[in-house]
Image (spheres, rainbow, N blue to C red):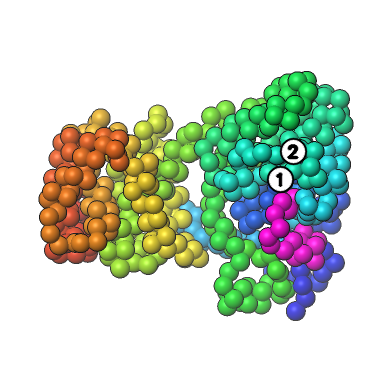
Amino acid sequence: MINLSKDNLVSIRTTGLIKPAEAIFSLPEKVLQFGTGVLLRGLPDYFIDKANRQGLFNGRVVLVKSTESGDAGAFDRQDGLYTLCIRGIEEGKKVEENIICSAISRVMSARDQWEEILQLAHRPEMQIIISNTTEVGIQLVEDDIRRRPPVSFPGKLLGFLYERWQAFGGSAESGMVIVPTELIVDNGKKLAGIVKELAQISQLPADFILWMEQHCRFCSSLVDRIVPGKPDAASLKQLEHDLGYTDELLSISEVYRLWAIEGNEKVRAVLSFAAADPGVVIAPDIEIYRELKLRLLNGTHTLSCGLAVLAGFGTVKNAMDDPAFAAFVSHLMLKEIAPSIPYQLPIEEAREFGLRVLDRFRNPNLQHQWMSITMQYSLKMKSRVIPVLLEHYKHHDGPPPHLALGFAAYLLFMRADKKEGWDEEVTRALQDESLWGADLTRLPGFADGVREQLDILMNKGAATALAKVSTQKSSL
């Protein structure tokens, strides 16, 4: 079987496979990307590849490998090509799509090729920087940008921007758009603050700092796509057999994709690849997308995970195959959480987002373990669920039954001794203002609702609790 590479593309004739045209390989390098992981390949690089095929962006991506871990050799052997196998459910229909992505031109090592990387700052067409260095990457550490290379990601970024400022004499046109995708709130603002502070510590010229502030745009962004990466050995073997070639970088991705970027029309003009797919959203305020994801996807996960484990389900897909559990999740998300998101937004927009989330939950190609979702359970309950509960009580004078069942399952899951003293335990747990930021016993009927659901869970089991809560749908 042949290996994936530019020279072998002509020999790959698999029906339905999306392949790059020859002209794509001569497009200029317009993006510098810190990070080589599957999320970047499955989201930003996917969008850029799609835009290139539509003739909308016409630029390629240079990856910077910043750490010593991992092997970038596969990118070299495959000329930057990789296969993205998109699998899932969209609007209730099964989706299967195989794409040979060609957005990546090459991978460069920060340790061994820093001077060459700095030379990219001299290219006028190099206008975009993307990063995913994990949340640890966006931190201020003691660094020297004159090192070759600097130690930290902000240090490397500052070094590159300083090189560009010098190369173009601080012109307005040479400013860059920087889009971090690290999973922290306001990632763009935080990165901008760190880079500015590092510039001041390094005693760089005031004119350079002013250029960064006026002509470089640090855009906060939110990424949302599950990209598990390389499939298990058996699945990979079958996929390569079906495709007709081997691929060291082959990855699986869900259908759903969202890259919300905080920016104006000038940012949109530079990030012209956004026009290729509705999954890229450029807006002055992206908080609505953060709220939708946090409440409808993450909040539903949090309220369902303990109950799912108690009911004996291993994965999200297993649970969604059960009609009673699927009905619980759907009602919880669309009827209780969606109307109570603590953010001003049209209810129809929340429900449309929720329906897409339900498609994601039903994806047969994702093995999302419920036990992994229970990690940091209390913290997730506080940040994702309690604001929804408090908002609910601004509009209703009784408890949301599905949320109460999810909370009862959380209490039962978290307690090692599941036999005695539950009445007092529930009261103490709900009154813990240091944990929740509010005394939840003051919410009319909520404590009684939780106790009732807990009693059913303990004495009759999760299946009975799910069946009974379905009869309470009309109470709201």
- Helix, strand or loop status at disc 1: loop
Using a 10 Å C-alpha cutoff, classify the residue at mark 2 as few (fewer than 14 neighbours), some (14 to 19) or many (20 or more): some
Instruction: Give the percent coordinates (x, y) of residue 349.
Output: 43, 38
Q: Position of residue 22 (x, y in %)?
A: 84, 57
The residue depicted at 30 percent of the width and 48 percent of the height is: 332
- Front-lying residue, 45 or 165: 165
**First to last magenta residue range:** 63-80
Q: Residue at x 74, y 38 (%)?
A: 144
For mark 1, what is the residue? 151
Above or below residue 14? Residue 141 is above
Kind of residue indicated by mark 1:
Val
Decide if residue 321 is in sight here.
Answer: no
- In the rendered structure, the answer to whether residue 98 lies left or right of residue 435 reads right
Closest to the observer: 114 or 396?
114
| Badge 2 or badge 1: first in the primary sequence | 2
Pointers 2 and 1 in contact (CB under 8 A)?
Answer: yes
Query: Which residue was labeled with disc 2?
Result: 144
Quarter location, residue 72: bottom right
Residue shown at 61% from the left, 53% from the top: 39
Q: Quadrant of the N terminus?
A: bottom right
Quadrant including the C terminus: top left
